[in-house]
Image (cartoon, rainbow, N blue to C red):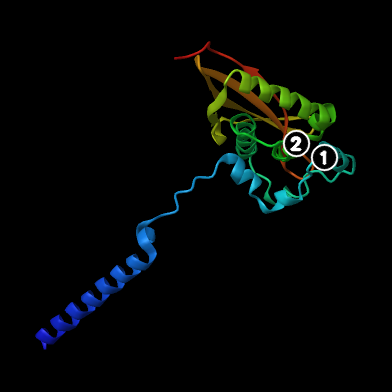
Amino acid sequence: MKRSIKWVITITLLLIVVVLVYYKAVNGDKIIQDDTTVLSDKDKLLGKDYVSDFPDTVEDVLSKIDSNTIGEEMESDYPLTVCQVVSLFTKIQRSYYNEDNSEKELIKLAYMATILFDKELIDNNPFDEYFEELQDEIEGYQDDNRIISRVIVGKSSDVKYSTVDGKKYASVECIYYVQNDSGTMKNVTTYILRKDEDGKWRILGWQLYQPDPWEA
């Protein structure tokens, strides 16, 4: 009986080997290949289903702002915490400065950024002006061969909260490492956020502090 079991096991193993050899012959190296494709921040951001409905021109964005429909596509997936809002904004920034964007892609990314902004910040920075300044900044990065090599957003325990006139505010620091041919510069930016009527944290503004010169 044991001998019969051994024969069955041996035949089964032989059949498995034959199947694997045949599969490999038909499919080449697919049997051992993994999908190692790495998506950039821009690919991940613009790969969202709702992005297909985003405006394609500055004029389209302005019309959405005028009709108060800006941000409707992202509200269901809006980040929940202060750190998540800032983290998403930094991913958009890295896509601004580190990626080779078409004008259409840049408009969509800029539009996505404004969805994270407080209404007061949007009112004080019309999209056409914001987009023009953004293009100038990107051109400056490209001329200096600069990229944002690393971003560190503060932890939830680092967030400072306050209430002023019944409105809730929060602040958190974010460290940027900007690299070019001369080395790496460390910038610290403090983001100020305010909770809106729907309980969502929106970026009200930010302040840049450069503590050190170029670091090796």
34 or 75, which lies in front? 34
For the residue marked with disc 2, what is the amino acid?
A: Thr
Q: Considering depth in this image, is 17 or 40 the residue closer to the camera?
A: 17
Q: Secondary structure at mark 1?
A: helix
Up/down of 214 relative to 60, above or below: above
**Left or right side of 186 for 143:** right
Q: Residue lying at the far bottom in this picture: please name it.
A: 1
Residue 49 locus on image (x, y percent):
68, 54
Q: Is residue 41 above or below residue 153?
A: below
Marker count (numbered):
2
SS type, badge 2: helix
Residue 196 occupies quadrant? top right
Q: Is residue 134 above or below residue 52?
A: above
The N terminus lies in quadrant: bottom left
| Image point (67%, 25%), residue name | 138
Q: Tell me the residue at 66%/27% (across/down).
A: 191
Tell me if label 1 and label 2 are in contact, CB under 8 Å.
yes
**Residue assigned mark 2:** 114
| Cα separation between marks 1 and 2 | 10 Å
Q: Quadrant of the C terminus?
A: top left
Question: At 65% from the left edge and 50% from the top edge, which residue is drawn?
Answer: 48
Q: Earlier in the sequence, mark 1 or mark 2?
A: 1
Could you say where residue 29 lies in the image, as x and y percent from the top left? 36, 58
Question: To which quarter of the image does residue 161 belong?
Answer: top right
Residue type beneath disc 1: Val
- Crowding near pointer 2: few (<14 within 10 Å), some, many (20+)? many
How far from the left and from the top, in percent, is residue 148? 56, 27
Nearest the eye: 163 or 188 = 188
Residue 92: percent from the left, percent from the top? 64, 36
- Nearer to me, 45 or 171: 45
Q: Which residue is mark 1?
A: 61
